[in-house]
Image: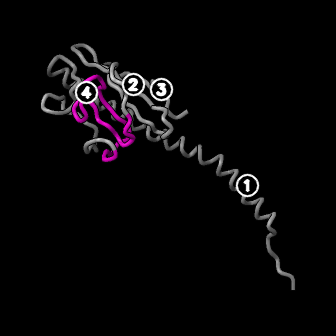
Amino acid sequence: MKQKAFSLIELMVVVAIIAFLASIAVPQYWKYNAKSKQAEVAMILASLHTAEQAHYAEHGTYSTELSGPNGIGWKPEGYNGGGKNAKFNYSYGFYFSGAQEGIHYFTGKLESKLDAGDCFADKERFFAKSCGDIMGKGKIDIWSIDETRNIVHEQNGID
């Protein structure tokens, strides 16, 4: 009586094919996952813009203070002190020398921060940023918004 079975070579060929397919699929999955995180940015920056416009309508100026006693009353939904406790990925707000977490900016799960210097708000304009290392490789994904609700993807952190 002869038993039928796969040879070792046949099994190795199947394993090699599966490994090859996985090597193609896994990087695409991570890119897809990163792009889904980018969808968060437009929504949260748009809500920041709406809060700034409401503050401007009431006070005639834009503000870098997003939260706190003198703030415009905005913070990202799911903010719990910043960092790993947050329920959002990117960091949002105004980054400048002396800026404070929870007042001027909010740090997301990715715990990324921009260099100080190019964010501002004054009587006529504002410029806020968002950033995050969405691929975990040290390349920061950077977005910005201004008073005209112009959302710009300044640096792509996926590629």
- For the residues carrying marks 3 and 4, which lies nearer the camera in this image? 4
Residue bearing the label numbered 3:
155
- Label 4, label 1: how many angstroms apart (C-alpha)? 53 Å
**Secondary element type, mark 2:** loop
Q: Are marks 2 and 3 in contact (CB under 8 Å)?
A: no
User: Of the numbered discs in the image, which one, if any, rests on residue 151?
Assistant: 2
Question: Which percent across, then down, holds residue 62?
Answer: 22, 20
- Looking at numbered disc 3 in the image, what kind of residue is underneath it? Gln
Q: Is residue 86 magenta?
A: yes
Identify which residue is drawn at 24% across, 31% down.
100
| Element carrying mark 1 | helix
The answer to which quarter of the image holds residue 39 is: top left
Furthest residue toward front: 98
Q: Which mark's residue is nearer the viewer, 1 or 2? A: 1
Q: Residue at coordinates 25% horizontally, 45% vertically from top-left? A: 80
The disc, 3 or 4, on the residue closer to the chain's N-terminal end is: 4
Q: Residues within 10 Å of mark 2 (few under 14, many from 20)?
A: some
In the foreground, 9 or 115:
115
